[in-house]
Amino acid sequence: MAILSDLGTEILVPACAIVGIVFSVVQWILVSRVKLSPERHSLSNSSKNGTAEYLIEEEEGLNDHSVVQKCAEIQNAISEGEFSIADLSEHLFPLYRISVCWNFMVAFAILIFVFLGSVEGFSTKSQPCLYNKGEMCKPALANAIFSTISFLLGGLTSLLSGFLGMKIATYANARTTLEARKGVGKAFITAFRSGAVMGFLLAANGLLVLYIAINLFEIYYGDDWEGLYEAITGYGLGGSSMALFGRVGGGIYTKAADVGADLVGKVERGIPEDDPRNPAVIADNVGDNVGDIAGMGADLFGSYAESSCAALVVASISSFGINHEMTAMFYPLIISSIGILVCLITTLFATDFFEIKAVKEIEPALKKQLIISTILMTAGIAFVSWIALPSSFTIFNFGSQKVVKNWQLFLCVGVGLWAGLIIGFVTEYYTSNTYSPVQDVADSCRTGAATNVIFGLALGYKSVIIPIFAIAVSIFVSFSFAAMYGIAVAALGMLSTIATGLAIDAYGPISDNAGGIAEMAGMSHRIRERTDALDAAGNTTAAIGKGFAIGSAALVSLALFGAFVSRAAISTVDVLTPKVFIGLLVGAMLPYWFSAMTMKSVGSAALKMVEEVRRQFNTIPGLMEGMPSLITPTCVKISTDASIKEMIPPGALVMLTPLIVGTLLGVETLAGVLAGSLVSGVQGGMCPSSALVGSANCHLCFQHCGAWDNAKKYIEAGASEHAKALGPKGSDPHKAAVIGDTIGDPLKDTSGPSLNILIKLMAVESLVFAPFCCTWWPAFQIWK
Amino acid sequence: MAILSDLGTEILVPACAIVGIVFSVVQWILVSRVKLSPERHSLSNSSKNGTAEYLIEEEEGLNDHSVVQKCAEIQNAISEGEFSIADLSEHLFPLYRISVCWNFMVAFAILIFVFLGSVEGFSTKSQPCLYNKGEMCKPALANAIFSTISFLLGGLTSLLSGFLGMKIATYANARTTLEARKGVGKAFITAFRSGAVMGFLLAANGLLVLYIAINLFEIYYGDDWEGLYEAITGYGLGGSSMALFGRVGGGIYTKAADVGADLVGKVERGIPEDDPRNPAVIADNVGDNVGDIAGMGADLFGSYAESSCAALVVASISSFGINHEMTAMFYPLIISSIGILVCLITTLFATDFFEIKAVKEIEPALKKQLIISTILMTAGIAFVSWIALPSSFTIFNFGSQKVVKNWQLFLCVGVGLWAGLIIGFVTEYYTSNTYSPVQDVADSCRTGAATNVIFGLALGYKSVIIPIFAIAVSIFVSFSFAAMYGIAVAALGMLSTIATGLAIDAYGPISDNAGGIAEMAGMSHRIRERTDALDAAGNTTAAIGKGFAIGSAALVSLALFGAFVSRAAISTVDVLTPKVFIGLLVGAMLPYWFSAMTMKSVGSAALKMVEEVRRQFNTIPGLMEGMPSLITPTCVKISTDASIKEMIPPGALVMLTPLIVGTLLGVETLAGVLAGSLVSGVQGGMCPSSALVGSANCHLCFQHCGAWDNAKKYIEAGASEHAKALGPKGSDPHKAAVIGDTIGDPLKDTSGPSLNILIKLMAVESLVFAPFCCTWWPAFQIWK
């Protein structure tokens, strides 16, 4: 038996979740202390805030009257800017609010109910258990009902977290700009705290809702844990379905707006980026938040929910579930609970224990967050494995039971945790302009856009190597020790520091917008330098976040794949059988097909946006002269509608493939398809060039598109002799760099991240519908 | 028993091979009838050739004196041009002649001998057979010796065929230009005949050498067919190793020369393409032949040799081999023999039965070649399956024997044959500027290089879909009917029309060079129009050829994979075991790694070339003024040396991975790696954008890079209103198209085709070294 009592578990998990929620509320309150009303900035008011005044004084020259006067003006300008930016949250809703999204949720919920209910012909009679031989389990109809409920819960939790994340992000960006006047440290803390709100809310909500759902379901299910945890998998499906909207829809949204704003505004009309005259600018800013905050949040939430569900479903048919050991059963949730505490302490390192005094300290501070949380979490995992697990137990291993020790499970979680860190840092190495890869890409711009693209592609291919080995090692270790349960907890290990990871990730777009506001408000060069530094650090760490996202997606998909194989009672997936091999081949092709669709979607949506912006410039008099664009919502609406419409084909590909293959070609071919798309999807996602979709590989590639972006920034910044030689803006190498950046943009922000969803959603859907496929396949089968 | 007697088989196979060789010699003689000496073109001489005169007369205006005079001048110019082009064959040698290549052959031969000999400690005693239980087989040392011999034979045959192919290509191009004066039909026939020389020589040589080797080996092996055909697999390894030089080395060579010539000549010095003043021009022209003729030839020869070996090795442990049914055993060779006859008849359709009268008939004529050969071959296969096979027999199926009917084997071969045709035509659809995909890509150039690249990428991803389904269907059908033997014969089916396929393929570079010669010689606009039309048709059909190459590579690799799995006595390759799964994941990453290496290699080699050409322009007085460049060989040498040096890292990756993985991690992990790289490598190769490496997928993608090339040509040609709107040369859309073309170039000519070699070579090497890995793995194993 575990050291921790069942009662202790029942207190610990919700307590940690509530601590997380409280902590994020506190962070929000701290951010809200930065007042946006211009009045406060008269000298008398600002003296209320001791530190702020101190910092203003610290900055040389800020004391003389003219500067204070200027500050007030900027303040005014920002207030106005802030209002339009604050309105963003109103515009963010469309993506979620519009009927399509709800219709989808409801339609899919009905589908789940009907499909799963049909397994036993909607019978209300108990049925013999599948794994727990000799016992009676709840009817399939109950599973259908509870799967539907947990699906809706998962979807709503994801939606809520994403919405709150965007709310705080749009709430915090102008405040970050204001704080930048007091010093880079203050600005950093504001941006980081806002990111933490998102991170902790999401991690704690996800945990709490899951915990409550399990406890409520248990009232009905009682001792039928096999059925209970099968029904809970709907939670993961719900979370991932919303991620489809966040990542695919959001990705199309953000790039359509971005391209539309740039092509017509910058290129055709020659007005600067983020110029308020451009009707698409608001849509563009909204897009940043939709894609990077809501999309990333929904994606990681999906991974988190799915890996928990995959672990729980395997645990329920292992000794934990068979012997009803609650504490051991909740091991995945306890890991996440401790993760919240660890991240809480880690956050204090950034916001309270140390203070950033110079621009060059920002990036190390963010990286330290990752390292500190990983080290602390390692100890946390060891502790949890010691108190929550029996010293020896058995784990379901495709039909047999495998004996596992508690220290082996510690190693499984630990290897996932550290693999995440390694993938993150490798990604950073290939996308940060501090290191030679991006500098080489920048250098290749000398000979034009073509060499830039080729070089970026080669870099992208190369950057996949180490992450794939890191994933391979963690799979091997966790698989060897604890079969598919090991993979699931390895994924959980990687995601255990999700609160910190998301805080860092959300920090990026907040700083980006803060910079935009400083630019729009015409603030002084020194303020902009500070927000630019914050932004640059954010870009780098965003790459780390994407590394985590794809690494965890790979592990999660594999864990779900394992759970699916277990649920479908497949004992081997033999490459040497034709049905598996062609599944593998076709599955590996899916990421390509999917990427072709998303790229086409971005193109179509962008075209609509371009036409609308052109139309407004041509038909609305006074727009170019600075008359405020009252028709801004039109652009937002176009982006929203287009993204929803354009995500249907790729969405349908993802949602229908498992059902069609599973029902017509059988679960073994489906297993092949899943393995193929997993192996293929990861690689493309990782490629810097992201030009590569391919395989686990696929995804790896995509995220390094950041290399092109940063190569452009490197030339623009001109921080070194080398960079100066390539610049300045407008030089031929810079033009070549811009082309590379434009190519990389849709790849890294739409196609790449969408691949995460492809591989995860197909796997979790297969798992949820496994009983359906198993039941109906014999009726439809094309081959044996 | 089969209808065809053993004696009949022993006559039929060599007879067909000899017929093929004789036919190609006849074609050569026919081509050589076109005389290059200017004297012949005085009116009295040309009257010897009745048809030629008739055709000249047919062309309006060619009869008046000034035109004849001009022809003589052109003739003179060409003769000079021809000499330098004819010298190419002297320069082609370096790639093969230089010590590295021989050293490699010898070193690898020694490696094979030592590794395979070590299996039984170089014992000369007979050993119990592995499959044919109860019988005694020849010692492992004998297998080592004969494998080494067959390896050398395979390498030499590939070398010889490639060399002769280049010889005829450089011999024929000026003759094609001359014939273009008489009419497009004459020129077409000359170019096509020359291509046929290459095609038939390669197909017939490959068959004959294999046939002789088997018969000679049989003198020693006697009834030990298991050992005999295991030793014969070295033939495939030898062929593929040379393909490594042809495809990877050749690919680096051709692109280094191309980029070097273009960057310094066209961009920096502003002299036209193919200008004789450019010191790299010869290297560039040599490169075309090395890459497209020798590379493609070696690649397809490798596929052909490997699929024959894979089929034979599986047959030897099936009922054919166990019962010593020679005719049935030789079924793969008989298919190839009939293929030569079918291709011979097909060729006559192009050269004798019909005559091309107008430019627009060229492309249909080439496509008809493929269709005719496929239809005739279908009948041929049916015939062979009827006469050469018993009506029922058993095939080795991973440990058990599977009962197969002769009509099932007919379907296996047939499905491969037709899948090849489908892949070819889909590839053509996505790369020919007759259809909307390329026109859309051209259209996307309006908004710049970035949209061009993105559009090309999306197109590339999309183009993978149908070919992957075609491959999947042929795998499923052939696998279901006859296990791995079915796959091997499906590959043979696809390659059975290799002579026609290669003829069409080699026709491309010949026409290309003919156009270059017309340009260099300053021939009239109308002549150039004809050679351009020949060239354009060649570009399209080259894409078809590449489709065949990758499609067959996928099937061949799978067949070799199956043979390897059989030889290593693996009964399942279960994705649900960690060692297989990580093999799959890492294997899927290898195409990325490999592509990163080859792209870097092209970059480095091109840089060296650029430096040399710059140095020559700067230091050699009079070069720009047209003084003939006596230091041309320097450029050829640089390209040769660089390509050899730069191919070492990617070559080492391919050659060492199977040995290291197989010895240290075991054959099951190696099986995973092979499956992963196969599934991943095919896709990348197919992508038009070729920006995708990924998965069987990988390779598919690459070859469609041709879409960018053709989009550029489409704009340049300005044949339609649409195209005219985008042009002319030098317009912004055209510049954008040039960037896309430059990006696609190294991908489609180096990285993409190299992936064929990656997947095939790793598979055949695993097969040859399977006994070694099985023996030594237990000593080194890291895990069980």
Image: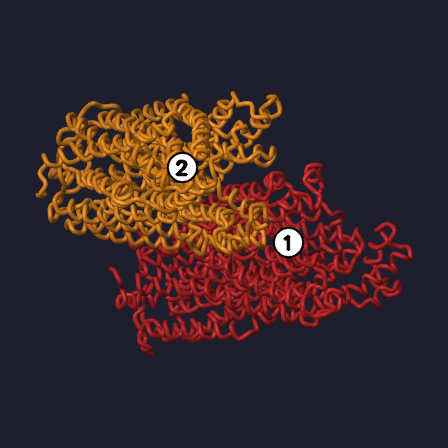
Chain colours: A orange, B red
Which residue does the image show at 13% across and 33% down from the upper left? A10
Between B242 and B303, the one nearer to me in the picture: B242
Q: Quadrant of the C terminus of chain B?
A: bottom left
Between A395 and B572, the one nearer to me in the picture: A395
Which residue does the image show at 18% across and 29% down from the upper left? A127
Q: Is residue A259 above or below residue A444?
A: above
Q: Quadrant of the N terminus of chain B?
A: bottom left
Image x and y of residue A12, in percent: 15, 36
Image x and y of residue A516, in percent: 46, 35
Q: Quick one: label 1, few (<14), some, or many (20+) residues within 10 Å? A: many
Image x and y of residue A658, in percent: 36, 36
Q: Which residue is mark 1?
A: B346
Is A336 on the left or on the right of B762, as rendered? left
Classify residue B560 by image quadrant.
Answer: bottom left
Image x and y of residue B354, in percent: 72, 50
Dot 2 amino acid type = Asn
Tell which subunit mark 1 falls on: B
Classify residue B125 by image quadrant.
Answer: bottom left
Q: Which residue is mark 2?
A: A63
Between A256 and B433, the one nearer to me in the picture: A256
- The secondary element bearing badge 1 is classed as helix
